[in-house]
C-alpha cells in the first residue's frame, strides 16, 4: 500500500504541468467559454403563447436567450436554428416587450413558415450560440409536448388560416 502511495506521489511530483483547483474561467479574465442557451417556440397566429403543434399557414417563432456564466445576456452572440430539413435560420436580437415596459425584454428570434409542402410529423431542431471562443447549444426535451409537430390543418387543436385564435378553456365547476 505504501509503495502504491509513494508511486502516485512521484508521478504527481514529476508532472511538469501546473495543476489548479480553480475553475477554467479564472484563466481567461473571468470569462467562461460556455454560453447558456434557453428558449421556446410560439405560434405567430396564436400570439406569444407557447406552442408545439403547427399547421400550414402558421409560422413557428423560435425565441431564445443566451447568457454568460455571470447570468448576463451575451448581446454579441450569434444564434442559429438548425432544422432537421437541413435549413439553418439566423436569429436576430431585438426588444420583445410592450412599449410601456419598465425593463424591456431582449431575446433572439427567427420565424419558420409552415407551408402545404412542409412534411407532417416531428420537425427536429437545435439552436447553437457562439461569441468568440464561447459556445452553447439548446435542444428541446425529447418528449412529445416539447417537440415541434407539423399537423394536417384539419387536425384537432389547430386554428385554420384566417380564423380567430381560441380563447382559454373554462375551468370545470367544482
Image (tube, helix red, strand yellow):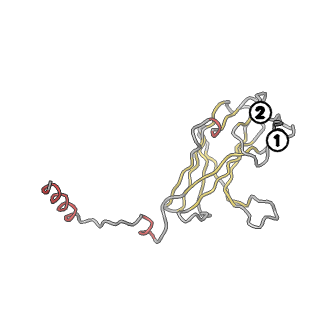
Local crowd at mark 1 within 10 Å, few (<14), some, or many (≥20)?
few
Q: How far apart are marks 1 and 2 (CA)?
A: 13 Å
Q: What is the x, y in percent for residue 141?
A: 58, 42
Task: Determine crowd level at label 2: few under 14, some 14-19, many 20+ residues with C-alpha closer than 10 A.
Answer: few
Front-most of 119 and 39? 39
The image shows residue 134, relative to residue 80, as above or below, that is below
According to the picture, the residue beneath numbered tag 1 turns out to be 168
Q: Is mark 2 on a helix, strand or loop?
A: loop
- In the displayed structure, 81 sits above or below 114; it is below
Left or right position of 98 against 112: right
> Going by the image, does 75 lie left or right of 153?
left
Residue 97 percent across, percent down from the top left = 76, 59
Identify the residue at horizontal 69%, vertical 39% (top origin).
52
Q: Can you say which quadrant of the picture contains the C terminus?
A: top right
Where is mark 2, residue-wise? 157
The x, y position of residue 5, in whole percent, is 17, 57
Residue depicted at x 45% and y 66%: 25
Residue 124 location, quadrant: top right
Q: Which of marks 1 and 2 is in front?
A: 1
Q: Residue furthest left?
A: 3
Secondary structure under the numbered disc 1 in the rendered image: loop
Compared to residue 116, the image places residue 110 above or below, namely below
Residue 157 x, y percent position in the rendering? 77, 33
Amino acid at each position: 500500500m505504501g509503495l502504491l502511495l509513494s508511486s502516485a506521489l512521484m508521478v504527481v511530483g514529476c508532472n511538469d504541468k501546473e495543476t489548479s483547483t480553480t475553475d477554467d474561467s479564472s484563466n481567461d479574465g473571468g470569462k467562461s467559454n460556455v454560453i447558456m442557451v434557453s428558449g421556446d417556440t410560439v405560434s405567430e397566429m396564436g400570439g406569444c403563447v407557447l406552442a408545439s403543434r403547427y399547421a400550414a399557414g402558421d409560422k413557428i417563432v423560435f425565441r431564445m436567450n443566451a447568457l454568460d456564466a455571470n447570468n448576463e445576456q451575451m448581446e454579441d452572440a450569434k444564434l442559429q436554428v438548425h432544422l432537421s430539413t437541413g435549413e439553418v435560420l439566423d436569429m436576430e436580437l431585438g426588444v420583445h416587450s410592450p412599449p410601456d415596459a419598465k425593463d424591456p425584454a431582449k431575446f433572439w428570434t427567427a420565424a419558420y413558415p409552415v407551408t402545404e409542402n412542409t412534411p407532417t410529423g416531428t420537425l427536429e431542431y437545435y439552436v447553437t450560440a457562439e461569441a468568440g471562443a464561447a459556445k452553447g447549444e439548446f435542444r428541446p426535451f425529447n418528449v412529445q409536448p416539447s417537440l415541434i409537430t407539423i399537423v394536417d390543418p384539419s387536425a384537432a387543436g389547430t386554428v385554420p388560416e384566417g380564423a380567430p385564435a381560441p380563447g382559454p378553456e373554462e375551468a370545470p365547476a367544482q
